[in-house]
Amino acid sequence: MKTISMHGHAFSFEEPYAEGHTINEAEANTLNQTFGENVVNNFRSKIKAAGVEHNVDFSKGERLPDHVHKALQAEFAAAADEYEFGVRSSSVSTSRDPVRSEAIRIAKTPIRNAIRKAIADGAPGYAGKTLKDFDGDAITAAAERYIDSPAGETIMEMAKRNIAEKQSVGDSILDGLIA
């Protein structure tokens, strides 16, 4: 028996499916549709990031260059092959490494500033837009690519210093509380 809550009220029902259950055609169609939607939702930010990187305005019907589309198709097929129902994932990695997370945070600032400048300059694909028009996952993906490049070493060093400083301040505060 499964119980769910709607508007503060509990409702119970028998779950019709269990491992090994044979499904009919309608159920297979529904599962395949949900599977496809989930893979697309998990991958969408990579497409948006590629659009930002290649200055493609999808709202105007512009398309990615063929070589980019082909590379993304290979990644998408791999994502579909690896997808499992019930396993949460994101196409943009989230890091539990505090130094990497700090580096991503630092790298986002010049990326956002570059977008703001392109908007202010009326660059193609940017005219009439605001920073809010740009997908946050795409900005994060661009920051990750930057810190993973040789040029990102400087930001990684800044992030290490910032985390060390925060840790030192935290230790000092903790020492004051315990003493």
Image (cartoon, rainbow, N blue to C red):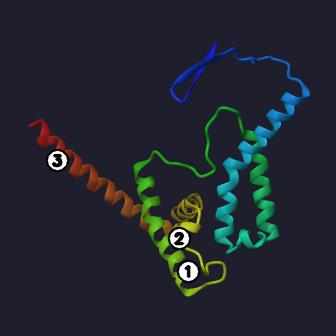
In this rendering, the label closer to the viewer, 1 or 3? 1
Does 3 sit left or right of 116 as displayed? right
Circle 1: residue type: Ile
Residue 86 appears in which quarter of the rendering? top right
Q: Residue at x 58, y 57 (%)?
A: 137
Q: Amino acid at mark 3?
A: Ser
Front in this rendered view, residue 40 or 74:
40
Q: Pointer 1: what residue?
A: 119
Residue type, label 2: Leu
- Identify the image quadrant of the C terminus: top left
Q: Work out which residue is located at the far right of the displayed protein and give it.
A: 25
Residue 40 sits above or below residue 132 on the image? above
Which numbered marker is on residue 131? 2
Using the image as rendered, state which of residue 127 and residue 98 is in the foreground.
127
Mark 1–mark 2 CB contact (< 8 Å): yes
What residue do we see at 59% from left, 85% from top? 122
Give the crowd class for mark 3: few <14, some 14-19, many >=20 residues within 10 Å. Answer: few
Residue 6 image label: none
| Residue that appears at 76% across and 66% down | 68
User: Secondary structure under badge 2?
Assistant: helix
Q: Circle 3 is placed at which residue position? A: 172
Q: Position of residue 124 (x, y in %)?
A: 66, 83
Separation of disc 1 and disc 2 at Cα?
8 Å
